[in-house]
Image (cartoon, rainbow, N blue to C red):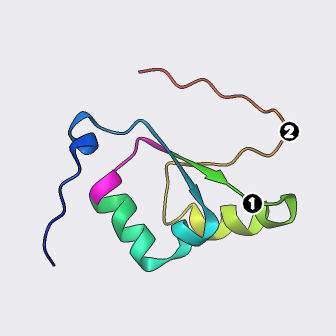
Amino acid sequence: MKALRFPLIVDGIDVAFADVMFLADSVGQYVMKEYIKPAHIILMHAGPEELDNAERNLTPLHPNLIIFRESMEKKLFAR
């Protein structure tokens, strides 16, 4: 497989937003770990009924996964 070059990656990615489909898919997992390499991943587009399942299945694949459970929940990310 030919290596892709993403200029954005040079500076590093602090936070990436991804949905369940991307994080559960083997290609998405590869892209996230080999190219994007974020410090934190925020799960998006997951309904309340999906959160427990997503946490159980995706956290082992992405230990840096953050799941917001409450409406308007806030987290502070500092370097």
* 68 or 16, nearer to the observer: 16
Q: Name the residue under label 2.
A: 71
Q: In this view, does 70 lie above or below 75?
A: below
Q: How far apart are marks 1 and 2 (CA)?
A: 12 Å
Q: Residue at x 19, y 62 (%)?
A: 4
Percent position (x, y) of residue 36?
A: 34, 52
Disc 1 vs disc 2: Cβ atoms closer than 8 Å? no
Q: Is residue 52 left or right of residue 19?
A: right
Q: Residue at x 48, y 20 (%)?
A: 78
Which residues make up the magenta segment? 35-40
- Which amino acid does the dot numbered 1 rest on? Ala
Percent position (x, y) of residue 75?
A: 66, 28
Which corner quadrant holds the N terminus?
bottom left
- Which amino acid does the dot numbered 2 rest on? Ser
Q: Name the residue under label 1.
A: 46
Percent position (x, y) of residue 29?
A: 42, 68
Tell whether position 36 is magenta.
yes
Percent position (x, y) of residue 46?
A: 74, 60
* 19 or 7, nearer to the observer: 7
Assign a secondary structure to mark 1: loop
Q: Is residue 7 left or right of residue 62?
A: left
